[in-house]
């Protein structure tokens, strides 16, 4: 955990530095470093890479044990997708910014109504407890190198 925490600290600080550069210098330098055509392709590839995972987790493909019936998985995932898509078209103002969050929350509520959510862990948990600390971050170069490509992915999606 310590090496991962150190890598995430470096990731966060790097993202802050990039954000400050964008704030004061603008995005023109990004267009030279990552042309818009390349940025669009990067974002599209990310989506295409995640599509099989989404299809598997929704119960549409594969024989994965999702902890619920196949029909429940399909109903919940399709409901969440429809709410999200409708939200991107219908919502205005602040709600137009968070249709994905609204889709996730609506899917969770439907899951709870359908009896898929297991609240036994919440019922057994203590009302108050102290956080468990896993130690201070360790700045391991291998962990940092492993997480830094994600910086460009997230940055490309934000600047997009």
Image (cartoon, rainbow, N blue to C red):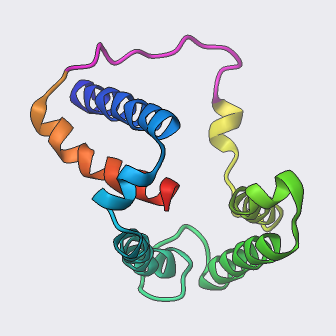
Tell me where the magenta segment starts and ends, as one range. 125-138
Picture quarter containing residue 72? bottom right
Q: Position of residue 88 (x, y in %)?
A: 77, 71
Picture quarter containing residue 120? top right
Q: Residue at (21%, 28%) from the top-left corner?
A: 3
Q: Position of residue 18 (x, y in %)?
A: 39, 37
Viewer-side residue, 31 vs 121: 31
Q: Residue at (71%, 35%) from the top-left corner?
A: 123
Work out whether 122 lies above or below 131.
below
* Chief secondary structure of the magenta portion: loop
Q: Residue at (36%, 27%) from the top-left corner?
A: 13
Q: How many marks?
A: 0
Work out whether 84 lies above or below 156.
below
| Quadrant location of the N terminus in the rendered image | top left
Residue 127 belongs to the span the image colors magenta: yes
Work out whether 136 lies above or below 148.
above
Q: Position of residue 19 (x, y in %)?
A: 46, 37
Q: Residue furthest bottom?
A: 61
In the rendered structure, the answer to whether residue 76 lies left or right of residue 134 reads right
Viewer-side residue, 52 vs 120: 52
Residue 142 belongs to the span the image colors magenta: no
Q: Position of residue 58 (x, y in %)?
A: 56, 78
Q: Is residue 16 visible?
A: yes
Q: Is residue 154 visible?
A: no
């Amino acid at each position: 955990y310590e090496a991962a925490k150190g890598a995430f600290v470096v990731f966060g600080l790097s993202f802050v530095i990039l954000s400050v550069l964008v704030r004061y210098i603008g995005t023109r330098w990004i267009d030279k470093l990552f042309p818009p055509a390349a940025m669009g392709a990067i974002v599209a590839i990310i989506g295409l890479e995640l599509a099989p995972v989404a299809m598997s987790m929704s119960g549409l493909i594969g024989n994965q044990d999702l902890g619920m019936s196949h029909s429940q998985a399909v109903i919940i995932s399709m409901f969440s997708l429809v709410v999200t898509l409708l939200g991107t078209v219908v919502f205005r103002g602040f709600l137009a910014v968070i249709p994905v969050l609204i889709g996730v929350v609506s899917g969770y509520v439907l899951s709870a109504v359908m009896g898929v959510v297991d609240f036994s862990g919440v019922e057994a948990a203590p009302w108050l407890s102290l956080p468990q600390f896993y130690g201070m971050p360790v700045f391991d170069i291998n962990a940092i190198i492993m997480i830094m490509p994600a910086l460009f992915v997230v940055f490309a999606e934000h600047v997009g």
